[in-house]
Image (cartoon, grey):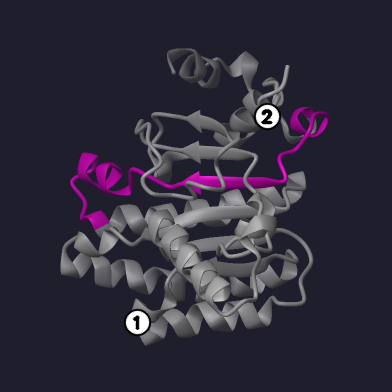
Amino acid sequence: MLGKLKMWKDKSKEFTKEDIMRGQIPNHIAIIMDGNGRWAKKRALPRSAGHHEGMKVVRKVTKLANDLGVKTLTVYAFSTENWKRPKLEVEYLMKLPEEFLGTFLPELIEENVQVRTMGDKSALPKHTLNAVENAMNETRNNDGLILNFALNYGSRAEILGAVKQLANDYKNGTVDLDCLNEDGFSTYLMTRNLADPDLLIRTSGEIRLSNFMLWQLAYTEFWFTDVLWPDFKDQHLLEAIKVYQQRGRRYGGV
């Protein structure tokens, strides 16, 4: 961790988009955007200010990832556990998708970004759901970067739901368990139409997955940083990808 932070602080070690594009670009990057509340607390601001600042970072990271040729960017926007937070904070978080997509949708359309979402939509407020569905509809024909919001998402709930659906299909005779493999099971997950992430980024110094894409991250490369999400810069994303490019992915082989 200290080595990575030193690399970031050493201006001679900064990377450019051109540097990164000489190597292999991860097809799918997943990000656990952590540290909004701590960023606000350090500045004696309400937690909502951190979430609002973090929203701006999503915009910048989306643009850079698209420029680099990343195919999918999944951001952990709201977990199934986040309902435990104070009521006012939850209400603000539920307004953020509406604000983000309302403000940046024209830019996303111009950048050829396709908006998707995964998670349990049934518990989302109507205004949140309307904003997400409108963005998905407006960008459905775009074929550039897929910006995938994990919204009211929890991986254990996702896997449990997949098992229940699989059991129901077996009961109805539409699936043969003897022929079921990992690829077949993956079709029951919310990411059925997406490749598994190649790179996971988590900010704020926490080193855990927090119930995020547990099945899909089985062979993903992890990159952790102490930087709080609102302070996450383009250079941090470039550094994370550079570290990814320097790793050997053997998938259990030699």
Of circles 2 and 1, which is in front? 2
Label located before the other in sequence (2 or 1): 1
User: Residue at horizontal 41%, vertical 43%?
Assistant: 229
Q: Which mark is residue 125?
A: 1
**Image height check: is 221 above or below 125?**
above
Q: Residue at x 57, y 74 (%)?
A: 169
Compare residues 14 and 1 and report the one nearer the observer. 1
Residue occupying image coordinates x 20% and y 55%: 46
Q: Can you give x and y, in whole percent of width and height, for residue 89 in the image? A: 23, 64
Q: Amino acid at mark 2?
A: Tyr
For residue 85, side relative to residue 198 (left or right): left
The residues tagged by marks 2 and 1 sit, at their Cα atoms, a distance apart of 41 Å
Q: Residue furthest right?
A: 22
At which x and y percent is residue 98? 44, 76
Q: Is residue 233 visible?
A: no
Q: Bin the neighbour count of mark 2 within 10 Å (Cα to Cα): few under 14, some 14-19, many 20 and up.
A: few
Tell me if residue 43 is in the magenta stretch.
yes
Q: Would you say the residues marked 2 and 1 are in contact, meaning their CB atoms lie under 8 Å apart? A: no
> Is residue 134 placed above or below 221 in the rendered structure?
below
What residue is at 67 percent from the left and 61 percent from the top? Answer: 146
Place residue 205 in its image quadrant.
top left
Is 59 on the left-hand or right-hand side of 89? right
User: How many other residues sit within 10 Å of disc 1, few (<14), some (14-19) or many (≥20)?
Assistant: few
Q: Position of residue 174 (x, y in %)?
A: 65, 76
Circle 1: residue type: Pro
Measured as percent of width and height from the top left, residue 12 is found at 63, 14
Which region is colored magenta? 19-47
Which element carries disc 2, helix, strand or loop?
loop
Q: Give the answer, above or below, for where 80 lies relative to 36.
A: below
Q: Label 2, on which residue?
A: 251
